Image (cartoon, helix red, strand yellow):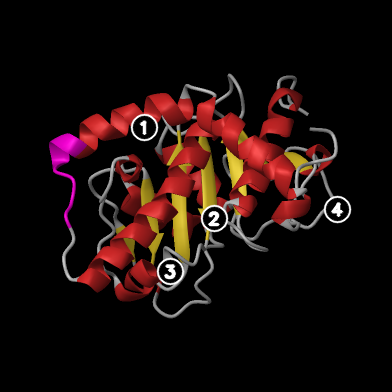
């Protein structure tokens, strides 16, 4: 195991359980983080229920999404999502793949997801839409082959998240707190946008507003402990926090 890996295991556990507690993840989905100080690998748990994850479940993977050490543990079939994005985006340090109910209508209808309030700016001015069928025809909709992961990474481009047709979303972050902030507020932005559509009119942040408000969100979400501490406390109050937290 990588010398520095143990330092981030606990935070992966917290981030995963926070995202379950905030309805971003359910029984499905996975969080990863790039190895500290080493761009050639990442950490992610074995395949297990996200709300039950503990530090001992975290494994080290190469960017080819192979486990560094032999393991008999069941692994997430879609781990190539993480490896291929880390290859394509050296700036990305954390990733979550998820299927939140609030985002699914946008994955089904292909209605563009746009920033509609201040914290929603964390999604960026543009959220791309990936149609797996374009490159691969009829599939199971899972992303299990390296070429499928590369196609998804190309669709993501330099954006912060990508919606996946009839599937879910993949969201990136500069670190784990930034990732949790973006994922939570992507869902809240989707809820607000859907409600505004029902009222008949949707006001959208301009590109300049999205850039400035997004930078503010990055400072508050990724480089301040305020939201991380808040969601950790909410996790503990829910009774779903890890026993060693």
Asked if the residue under mark 1 is in contact with the one under mark 3, i.e. CB atoms within 8 Å, the reply is no
What's the distance in space between the residues labelled 4 and 1, CA to CA? 40 Å
Locate residue 135, reporting x and y percent: 35, 68
Q: Is the residue 34 above or below the residue 144 in the image? A: above
Mark 2 vs 1, N-terminal side: 2
Mark 2 lies on residue:
24
Locate residue 183, reporting x and y percent: 47, 47
Mark 3 lies on residue:
104
Q: Is the residue 104 above or below the residue 21 in the image? A: below
What's the distance in space between the residues labelled 4 and 3, CA to CA? 33 Å
Q: Is residue 61 visible?
A: no
What's the distance in space between the residues labelled 2 and 1, CA to CA? 18 Å
- How many other residues sit within 10 Å of disc 3, few (<14), some (14-19) or many (≥20)? many
Mark 1 lies on residue:
217
Mark 4 vs 1, N-terminal side: 4
What's the distance in space between the residues labelled 3 and 2, CA to CA? 11 Å
- Mark 3 vs mark 1, foreground winner is 1
Asked if the residue under mark 2 is in contact with the one under mark 3, i.e. CB atoms within 8 Å, the reply is no
* Residue 168 shown left or right of residue 213 in the figure: right
State the extent of the magenta-drawn residues as a range.
203-209
Nearest the viewer among 80 and 94 is: 94
Q: Secondary structure at mark 4?
A: loop
């Amino acid at each position: 195991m990588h010398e520095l890996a143990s330092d981030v295991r606990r935070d992966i556990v917290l981030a995963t359980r926070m995202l379950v507690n905030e309805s971003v993840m359910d029984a499905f989905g996975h969080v990863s983080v790039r190895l500290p100080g080493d761009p050639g690998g990442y950490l992610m748990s074995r395949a297990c229920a996200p709300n039950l994850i503990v530090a001992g479940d975290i494994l080290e993977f190469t960017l080819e999404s192979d486990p560094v050490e032999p393991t008999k543990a069941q692994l997430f079939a879609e781990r190539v999502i993480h490896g291929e994005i880390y290859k394509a985006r050296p700036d990305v340090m954390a990733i979550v793949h998820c299927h939140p109910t609030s985002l699914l209508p946008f994955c089904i209808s292909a209605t563009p997801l746009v920033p509609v309030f201040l914290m929603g700016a964390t999604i960026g001015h543009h959220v791309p839409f990936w149609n797996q069928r374009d490159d691969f025809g009829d599939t199971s909709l899972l992303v299990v082959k390296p070429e499928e992961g590369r196609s998804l990474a190309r669709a993501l481009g330099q954006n912060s998240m990508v919606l996946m047709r009839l599937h879910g979303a993949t969201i990136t972050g500069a670190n784990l707190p930034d990732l949790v902030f973006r994922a939570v507020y992507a869902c809240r932005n989707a809820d607000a946008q859907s409600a505004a559509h029902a009222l008949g009119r949707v006001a959208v942040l301009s590109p300049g507003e999205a850039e400035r408000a997004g930078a503010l969100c990055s400072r508050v979400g990724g480089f301040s402990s305020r939201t991380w501490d808040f969601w950790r406390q909410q996790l503990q109050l829910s009774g779903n926090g890890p026993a060693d937290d």
